[in-house]
Image (cartoon, helix red, strand yellow):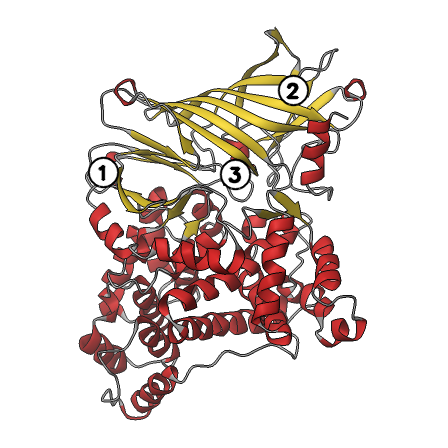
Amino acid sequence: MSPIAAAVFAASATAPDIHSFGNAGVVRPTHLALDLTLDFEQKVLRGTCELTLAYAGDPAATDVLDLDSRGLKVENVTADGKALAFELGAQDAILGERLRIRLPQPRPASVQVTYTTSPGATALQWLEPRQTTSGKLPFLFTQSQALHARSWIPTMDSPGVRQTFEAIVRVPAGRGFTVVMGAENGAHDVDKGVFRFRMPQAVPPYLIALAAGEIAFQPLGPRTGVYAEPAVLPRAAKEFEDVEKMVVATEAIYGAYDWGRWDTIVLPPSFPFGGMENPRLTFATPTILAGDKSLVSLLAHELAHSWSGNLVTNATWSDFWLNEGFTSYIEGRIVEAVYGVDFADMELVLTQRELGTTIEEMLKEAPDGTILFANLEGKDPDDLVGPIAYDKGASFLRVLEARFGRPRFDAFLKAYFQAHRFGNMTTARFLEILKRDLFVGDEAAWADAKVMEWVYQPGLPSNYVVARTARFERTRAAVDAFAKSGDLGLVKKDWSSAEWQDFVESLPRPMTPAQMEALDAAFGFSTAGNNEIRFDFLMHVARNAWAPAFESLEQFLCSLGRRKFLTPLYAALMESDATRDLAKRIYTKARPSYHPIAVATLDAVVK
């Protein structure tokens, strides 16, 4: 094995990935060179992907290269200018199709695939001009996590196979398109519609991201800025003005930010997630633009991924908690450093409440779904239940922090990120490191901390550290007063966003029409500018079939595509005969505007 190949294979975990067709144990891509043309009329990408290869041993022993694809139309495969034989395997509902390339002798250093994506590519959402803010240009954005990169890039689509990349992206010239990627900008030729990018750090394919449309930029700090549609940009820039402080605060705890710049793009409302941690360029939903910075903890979460997830990445999707649990823990630390302990504690109580509810419900029907190390055999990673990997994982880390103290635990995490930077991690390997470096081999302490129970057993162990905040005492008192007599006198207009969320979430599940009317008349919850508060109230609207707010509910469901909001709202509507037809009517209307990832989830809910 060459020194380069040895380094490549050593940097990635050896755990087999059940969600990839790739034969990464013997040969793998180390660099991608993309040359893509965006066809907004046909809603496809056309072009080439050249893959630089590394071989694990004697190249002569490897006669095929197996890649992941989904719906790709492969026109030809070449190496050194000569055509190679290839075949696409049968379609798998979760994995897509295997692209098998026959390798000639001598084994090539690279292969080039010429291909076209499908109009239904699951990573791509093509928006018509009418679906954008200005209505001038169409818009395209990608969402590659978890298994969707294979629908627009033929490569080994596994978190354990890291690849550097470069890209030339071509758009219609002279129409005002801007293209951005999670990568360094190269020598763009804007007049000709040609944009160039380079990512020198190796990343897994799920972190390769692209957006194109009418996009403007505003710097926020020496290494931070925000992209958005021009009409959205001023509001986004004001909301995100603390991002440079976030980077400084995180570096103070966990070491240097290794990605150069940290910019954010606010995407159109159909983006199916809150945020996506694409290196150098976080993709974010506009639903966090509340006007008071009350929802910017989402940005803290995406920034935290620059250490946990992007720098040290889960080797397989079963190890997903190593990304999201760590990131959720670090998010809390960033929020505390920038906005204070009270803010962080209130947000933590809210997330722990959701975790507790999720685990309580899942223990009745699917207890194994509450295990951190997920058994995903035959399952789509997109179906992982968020609060488990995110909040149970973070809760485990808080147990370790409480046991060893912050200084020692911070030093452990900082050293862990540095030692394994730009590499992959399995759960088993992390536990070995944890026992060796933090517990220092103390078996009694290991057992007492219930480490294996946290990672491999369902539910929440008894040493769970419960978050508390005195700030919610007055919101709960206000809820009790309202539930008993309809009295709203204890509600204070100067409450923080988190206190309003606690109040609305804690309201009685069954409420009378008079109670719903009193709340909405007093506070305008059904049309609130804070989408988290509005969502919480609309859940009460759905559960109580409160018709006066159905118009607002429909507008909400038709104006955004974030799965966090859509899935529970549609599920609540589908539970009752009184609202089931409403759910189906709204979904029929809204479905064409949703991202394919959201549609895949919601089709199973609204049926």
Amino acid type, callout 3? His
Residue topped by disc 3: 148
Disc 3 to disc 2, C-alpha distance: 20 Å
Residues at circles 1 and 3 in contact by the CB criterion of under 8 Å: no
Q: Image check: 351 left or right of 530? A: right
Lower sequence index among marks 3 and 2 = 2
- What residue do we see at 25% from left, 20% from top? 191
Closer-to-camera residue (181/119): 181
x and y, in percent, of residue 430 in the image: 69, 56
Amino acid type at mark 2: Glu
Task: Tell me which numbered mark, 2 or 1, is placed earlier along the sequence.
Answer: 2
Q: Is residue 144 above or below residue 48?
A: below
> Can you tell which mark lies on residue 87?
2
Would residue 605 be seen by someone viewing this image from the given angle? no
Q: Is residue 374 left or right of residue 496?
A: right
Q: Secondary structure at mark 1?
A: helix
